[in-house]
Amino acid sequence: MSGHSTYTPKTGLTRWLDSRLPILRLAHDSFVDYPTPRNLNYFWTFGGILGLCLGVQIITGIVLAMNYTANAALAFNSVEHIMRDVNYGWLIRYTHANGASMFFIAVYVHMLRGLYYGSYKAPREVLWLLGCVIYLLMMATGFLGYVLPWGQMSFWGATVITNLFSALPLVGPSITTWLWGGFAVDNPTLNRFFSLHYLLPFVIAGVVVLHVWALHVVGQNNPTGVEPKSKADVLPFTPYATVKDGFAMSLFMIMFAVFVFYLPNSLGHADNYIPANPIVTPAHIVPEWYFLPFYAILRAVPDKLMGVLAMFGAIACFFALPWLDTSKVRSKRYRPTARLYFWLFVLSACVLGLCGARLPDDQVIPGLKTFTLIDSDPNSFVWLSRIAALYYFAYFLLITPILGLVEKTSPVPETIASPALNAKKA
Amino acid sequence: MTLKLLSKAAVLAAFAGLLSFGGAVMAATTEAEAPKTQFSFEGPFGKFDQAQLQRGYKVYREVCSACHSMSLVAFRNLGDKGGPFYDPKYPNSNDNPVVKAIAADYMVDDIDTETGDPSKRPAVTADYLVAPFKNEYAARASNGGALPPDMSVLAKAREGGPDYIRAIVNGYKAAPAGLTVAPGKYYNPYFPGDMSSSWKGDPNDVPEGGVIGMPPPLSDGSVTFDDGTKSTLDQQATDVAAFLMWAAEPKLNERHQLGAAVLIYLLLLSTLLWFSYKTVWKHESH
Amino acid sequence: MSNLAVGATTDPGHASDDPSRRDFIHIAAIAAAAGGAASVAWPFIDQMNPAADTLALASVEFDLTKVMEGMQVAIKWRGKPLFIRNRSAAEIAAAQKDDNAPMKDPAKDADRVKVGKEQWLILIGTCTHLGCVPTFGGGDWGGWFCPCHGSQYDTAGRIRKGPAPLNLELPDYAFLSDTKVKIG
């Protein structure tokens, strides 16, 4: 809901600046007077939280880069130098490492909010696509960053993921050699990963600017999915949303602090404290937790190339979502059937995550051996991930388009502040 | 509203579950689970016990350092705050006489500036703990082809950390009848491995654990403790595990203390922001 | 939490609220947040200070038996060259003779060495002009000569000729024994 600006510069200096570069006007219109729906719940605070996470990662990252050495012979020891000798190095390193996990926790909540309330639907498709681009960039940045300490998981995770490209027909192996800068993951790879890891967060920041711009053009969605119709539906962003975002951020920081100060290695892998060894593969290569669902999808498909395509397809589903959803109703608050399938989707994603952490042939129910179906016992994590992956894709490609056409929805209120809503909210 | 809160809680719980399972990497190995020890540094208020660190250092120095390097720990670290030989009289650990004496006991490589030939000089506090072998090949040659891992971050590099280390050291058992153990290897139920191919007994009863290249390094009384603590195998195992945890996480004490301050501050800030939020929204409905 | 009352708008009856009480909580919250943000800044600033391993090399102990009379040994200390010069009696006498001679940075020879150890002159080997390392024994006074722009130092390390503004710098040092000195 972009109306005209209400900013009036009060002092001589601000008037002078406003006529040359209206940056204060922009800030005022975007974050002070900006009309915000009054009924936003706490799921809407995660955008601000994500901005905070990006800032934390960039600042801690730049400072870490002052003390880190991106050379295969020196990288592991330089990280230990940071932990032991650099003043507060341990704090900055643990903040950055756990900050990545916090960043992904927040982004998944933020994305699920969008999924639940239909924030991807018209006119917010570009906003949604920009968000998907940010998510992709985050995954790339996280992957590159994890390689830098040059531990066993860093090295072997890089080996596995770069080897995925060799699945591409004809050009695959050449692309992989090109990525490596050699015949295997080694020093040239580490150097270029460091450079790219430093670069991408600033690309993310740029796309975030576009994302917020796109948001401000169409205005926020809200839990009812009904656009604000009058002044009664909205409140100025400052102080109403500012203080709520601030409160949510401080709660988020409590969770962050618990991890940094008391559980700093709980989300990582012990194997990454073993220096990288190209001759010895760890018993179990596992990516960081935020990649686990996609890792499970990759391993669910028996064919190497199809597995890679399925993994990228799983991400592509998010991009296609605005055009897959045929429902006339935006928010799942008024779509009881869609709600059910949505929660099943969340469950399937969690199950996929669980499967990604396990060996494919491990038994789901311990001790129960049945028969061999294609390549493995049905009582195995690979089969569980196949079932969950099937639901994952079905949710996007079948359930979402079909449901929109055949579902029975609850009555949608006229306005955000409508009396009809008094009854119950979901 | 309650349902929304419940669904939010469910999502968070699912994530928490995912995280905890994501962490528990299950390999196809069968080792016994290390029993949980009550170390002084565990828990949010945990800190190192200096007396225990001194005993653990003695075990490392007299037994483990014969094969295991600790190249990321410098002599001066032994005198740092939270470390085994910290003395408040010497806030700069480079001045600590105990630390200087420990360093001076070791010789490190140097170059004779007059002839250019390699020579040796006594270590100073700035030097790092001296490795027992020149390089990996020498280490393997002296240990039947196995490489004794560097111990600087060992306590963080193994699932179970100090509990695992204590269990391994304590846990050596005679191989049960029917289990073939190669010469130069030793059966240990806490070491990851799969004994099914070396087992001639009941296939449903494969002994858990694996074979480790290290012979049992400690026994009752193998290291005498200067503070008079009874030197049982378990005491030595526990103390060296605590020392290795210090070596891996020397900043643990500081981390816990700063954490308490930060959390108190954040709880205070959240309370202030909550009331500020409530005040701002007092006359507006959501 | 939410309460979608009829016609959710601003409640008009709030004029009776005490505004100063309302402002205080906001000021307190903002102040607390600002205080937190400021204290967060310290670790980032402090991490640029020398790290513990750098500080450990801040002092060095040197064995003086390595330096022959009339000679100098140069070692690296804190990333800079350090001259340890064993002065001959003639060099000491020449330095003391010039104590009151006109010079850019007047200093007495006795102030630049330790009592009872006058033969040991310990200086940071960086020319005070633009930082080159002066060569041993050159120049008209037999002290040091800087090849970059021609500064000349005497046998007490004092600037006598050339563009350098100050005498060669003296580090903190102390003799641990007749044969051992700790610098820094």
Image (cartoon, helix red, strand yellow):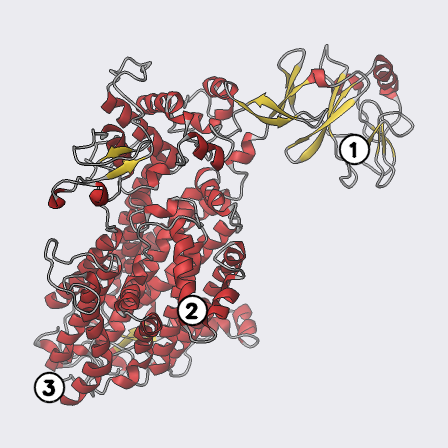
Residue A130 picture location, percent across and down:
39, 76
**View extreme (right): residue:** C140
Which chain does tag 2 point to?
A: A
- Give the residue at mark 2: A165
Question: Between marks 1 and 2, how big is the CA–CA gap?
Answer: 64 Å
- Give the residue at mark 1: C166
Q: What amino acid type is highlighted by mark number 3? A: Lys
Q: What is the number of the mark on residue A408?
A: 3
Q: Nearer the viewer, mark 3 or mark 1?
A: 3
Where, quadrant-wise, is the C terminus of chain A in this rendering? bottom left
Identify the residue at image location x=24%, y=84%.
A325
Tag 3 and tag 1, C-beta contact below 8 Å: no
Q: What amino acid type is highlighted by mark number 1? A: Leu
Q: What is the number of the mark on residue B191?
A: none
Where, quadrant-wise, is the N terminus of chain A in this rendering? bottom left
Question: Between marks 3 and 2, how big is the CA–CA gap?
Answer: 44 Å
Q: Is residue A333 left or right of residue C168?
A: left
Q: Nearer the viewer, mark 1 or mark 2?
A: 2
Identify the residue at image location x=56%, y=35%.
C54
Which chain does tag 1 point to?
A: C
